Image (tube, helix red, strand yellow):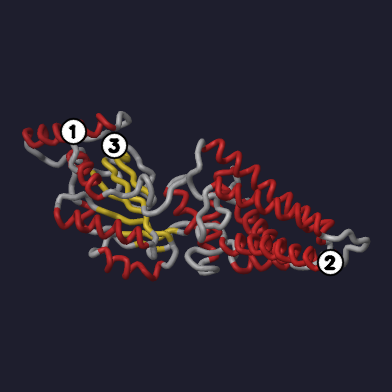
């Protein structure tokens, strides 16, 4: 009987320990375990912590400390010091906090969509799936607590603190926090002549400087302007100076992302079929930037681009959004925005229709213009 209880006890400890260790390692992984710690942990911060109200200053410390605690609890479940009195109750309490948070998030979102972030981007899991997983883990821990014998001595508490601080320190060393100064543009390619194709509003700028033009030409230009949306600032001029003049396409890509490459290739095919297609520029995430030449080779063409750091990239992409991102601007007005690989993913044929719609037709579907 005692042997059976011991077998069950160790089975539960190994299962729950594996869940916690895998959860910690997954938050430091992109496609394979520990393949890109800084990218993965930054993505976790932007997609999970920022939505909870954490600031950019606090999130990097909280994320690394939380992951370190997860790793430490996973390891400490496999040793006997203070196991029943401290480790099992604390692990159970943490899981209950996770369940409460996920329940709240699911209630607010009104559904069961998106990735809860429990296993980072390595193993996407919906909030409901995560809640079920955590409830099962809590049940196992409660049963484990009953299986563990009552002992008068709990062992060496310094082992717990050593494992905890060592785990947290390891996370900080594996994914060091980068200074804010390095978070903006790190590289750029000059805009091509294609980005300076005159638009009606740009010609007006020239007229205002006193350039002599025939009256019928001015009338024609004024007519064209009346058919365009009002000029606004899109907030992207810091990346591409002419982005708010005329019709432009701005893409948000990750060099190693297969979906991004597919979108770029489809855009190139559209350009080959229609030479009047608006100029295209790209903002790349500074993740595997050495793959950019290969990216353009697969896309079938090169485009003006800039590279920015991971967290600023996620921020400009937009809350809750994912790559690939494709935006169509007209005089700085956002006409259409595709993002991610699910419901709002890039649709080449639909996008081509938007490009050929008149301003009047666009206003019918977008009253904000």
Q: Secondary structure at mark 2?
A: helix
For the question of whether residue 164 can be seen, the reply is: no
Q: Residue 336, relative to residue 92: is it above or below?
A: above
Image spot of residue 182 (x, y percent): 51, 60
Label 3 – label 1 distance at C-alpha: 12 Å
Image spot of residue 198 (x, y percent): 18, 47
Q: Nearer the viewer, mark 3 or mark 1?
A: 1
Q: Nearer the viewer, mark 2 or mark 1?
A: 2
Label 2 – label 1 distance at C-alpha: 74 Å
Q: Residue at x 42, y 49 (%)?
A: 317
Q: Residue at x 30, y 55 (%)?
A: 281
Q: Residues within 10 Å of mark 2 (few under 14, many from 20)?
A: few
Label 3 – label 2 distance at C-alpha: 65 Å
Q: Secondary structure at mark 1?
A: loop
Q: Residue at x 14, y 42 (%)?
A: 211
Q: Residue 192, relative to residue 101: is it above or below?
A: below
In the image, 79 versus 29, the foreground residue is 79
Q: Nearer the viewer, mark 3 or mark 2?
A: 2
Image spot of residue 181 (x, y percent): 53, 58
Q: Earlier in the sequence, mark 2 or mark 1?
A: 2
Residue matched to label 2: 158
Please tell me how many numbered marks the rendered image carries: 3
**Residue 209's quadrant in the figure?**
top left
Residue matched to label 3: 231
Q: Residues within 10 Å of mark 1 (few under 14, many from 20)?
A: few
Q: Earlier in the sequence, mark 3 or mark 2?
A: 2
**Residue 103's quadrant in the figure?**
top right
Residue matched to label 1: 227
């Amino acid at each position: 009987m005692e042997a059976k209880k011991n077998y069950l006890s160790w089975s539960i400890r190994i299962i729950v320990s594996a869940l916690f260790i895998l959860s910690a390692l997954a938050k430091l992984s992109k496609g394979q375990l520990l393949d890109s710690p800084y990218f993965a942990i930054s993505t976790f911060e932007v997609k999970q912590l920022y939505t909870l109200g954490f600031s950019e200053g606090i999130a990097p410390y909280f994320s690394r400390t939380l992951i370190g605690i997860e790793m430490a609890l996973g390891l400490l479940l496999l040793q006997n010091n203070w196991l029943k009195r401290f480790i099992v109750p604390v692990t159970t309490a943490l899981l209950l906090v996770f369940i409460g948070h996920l329940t709240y998030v699911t209630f607010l979102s009104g559904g069961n969509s998106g990735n809860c972030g429990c296993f980072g981007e390595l193993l996407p899991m919906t909030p409901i799936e995560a809640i079920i997983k955590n409830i099962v883990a809590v049940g196992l821990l409660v049963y484990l607590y009953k299986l563990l014998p009552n002992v008068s001595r709990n062992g060496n508490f310094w082992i717990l603190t050593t494992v905890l601080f060592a785990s947290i320190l390891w996370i900080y060393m594996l994914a060091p926090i980068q200074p804010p100064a390095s978070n903006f543009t790190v590289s750029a390619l000059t805009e091509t002549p294609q980005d300076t194709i005159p638009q009606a509003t740009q010609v007006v700028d020239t007229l205002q400087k006193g350039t002599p033009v025939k009256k019928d030409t001015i009338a024609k230009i004024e007519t064209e302007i009346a058919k365009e949306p009002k000029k606004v600032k899109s907030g992207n001029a810091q990346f591409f100076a002419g982005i708010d003049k005329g019709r432009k396409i701005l893409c948000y890509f990750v060099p190693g992302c297969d979906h991004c490459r597919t979108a770029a290739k489809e855009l190139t095919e559209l350009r080959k079929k229609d030479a009047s297609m608006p100029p295209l520029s790209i903002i790349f995430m500074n993740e595997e930037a050495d793959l950019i030449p290969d990216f353009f080779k697969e896309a079938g063409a090169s485009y003006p681009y800039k590279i920015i750091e991971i967290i600023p990239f996620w921020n400009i992409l937009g809350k809750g959004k994912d790559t690939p991102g494709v935006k169509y601007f007209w005089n700085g007005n956002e006409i259409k925005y595709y993002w991610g690989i699910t419901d709002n993913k890039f649709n080449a044929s639909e996008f081509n229709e938007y490009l050929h719609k008149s301003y009047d037709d666009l206003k019918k579907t977008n009253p904000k213009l």
